[in-house]
Amino acid sequence: MNISEIKIAVDAMGGDNAPTEIVKGVVEFINKNKVKVILVGKADLIYSQLLQYKYSQDMIDVVDASEIISNDDSPTEAIKTKKQSSMVIGLYMLKEKKIDAFISAGNTGALVAGSTLIVGRIKGVKRPALACMFPTLNGISLLIDVGANVDAKPIYLKQFAQMGSIYFRNVVGVKEPRVGLVNIGTEDKKGNELVRESFKLLKDSDLNFTGNLEARNIFRGEADIIVCDAFVGNIILKHSEGLVKDIFGLIKKELNSSIMSKIGALFAIGAFKNIKKIFDYSEYGGAPLLGLENLVVKAHGSSKASDIQAALNQCVKFVEQDIANEIAKKMENDKEEEKGE
């Protein structure tokens, strides 16, 4: 698809910094890219923000939504009862093919539930999964699942690996991504029943499966696709985010503890900035919910304008590469192979 034909909707009311940072990110994005963006939310609030910027009015539309799904709302209940919310309206726009992708920084549970109920899964996909770009010492990896399936089955994890590999190959450009299964040890028979059975499925697949991956080796970049259930994945993600933030906070504190430390910091400031950028999750624009008929991206709840821009750029790559269709073809091929057996 030509980039000028792509349409992306953004939930203007989702996240801690909505609608201010959401609108700012969209404006900055369309001023650099010829991509149509639809802001969904309370129109009066959105227009009051847009008045602060110069932009091509042809590139931004506003769709009014009178309700908001908050983080305190029960996910499934909110999707069923708040039909006029920015999230639900955006998801229906995606289902009806009025847009090519939808981004929200709102309630994760509601977004996953709504995406599954409204947009629908690709035929053959057991469960959609949230995939997050994960910075490592060797570049980036893809951590999947980080929030959609706390309780999983071995076939889910196999499909997570398949979908993640397709996504990584198209977006990052790695032809044969290395797949690692998060476990408490590298031996084949380590772990609980879920992991042991998942290991067998991955080993017998056509994926570039490199075996079990211990948590201490994740940051070393020993796998391109890091596979686990959402309970484990969410802990890894949030622990890593907190650890990186706290380490840099500690370094900053120590560097300001004395005159000599401050002088040394002046010489090392460039290196520290580069390291901080490497481990900055906002560079990657949120987590795509892989396995749906069309693309939904969950942006971080505390997203700033730069995060929204990154999420929009991610959507463009996804649509251009037709990743949803490639996942659908993989699921169909697997089904045919099962019949042949």
Image: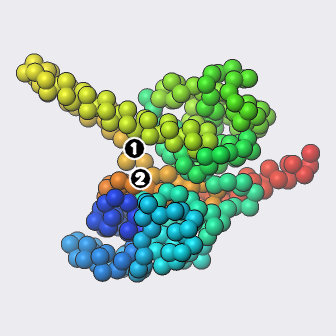
The kind of residue on which mark 1 rests is Tyr
Residue ID at (61%, 46%) = 150
Quadrant housing the N terminus? bottom right
Q: Of tags 2 and 1, which is closer to the observer?
A: 2
State if disc 1 and disc 2 touch (CB < 8 Å).
yes
Mark number for residue 84?
Answer: none
Residue ID at (61%, 38%) = 227
Front-most of 40 and 308? 40
Tell me the crowding category of disc 2: few under 14, some 14 to 19, or many 20 or more residues within 10 angstroms, Cα based. many
From the viewer's perspective, is 177 left or right of 269?
A: right
Residue farthest along the left direction in this orientation:
259
Tell me the crowding category of disc 1: few under 14, some 14 to 19, or many 20 or more residues within 10 angstroms, Cα based. some
Tag 1 residue: 281
Quadrant housing the C terminus? top right
| Residue 215 shows in the view | yes
With respect to residue 252, does 35 lie above or below? below
Between discs 2 and 1, the one toward the N terminus: 1
Residue 255 image offset from top left, x and y in percent: 17, 25
With respect to residue 106, does 191 lie above or below? above
Mark number for residue 300?
Answer: 2
Q: Quadrant of residue 210?
A: top right
Q: Quadrant of residue 240?
A: top left
From the viewer's perspective, is 280 left or right of 111?
A: left
With respect to residue 158, does 57 lie above or below? below
Residue 131 image offset from top left, x and y in percent: 55, 48
Element type at mark 2: loop
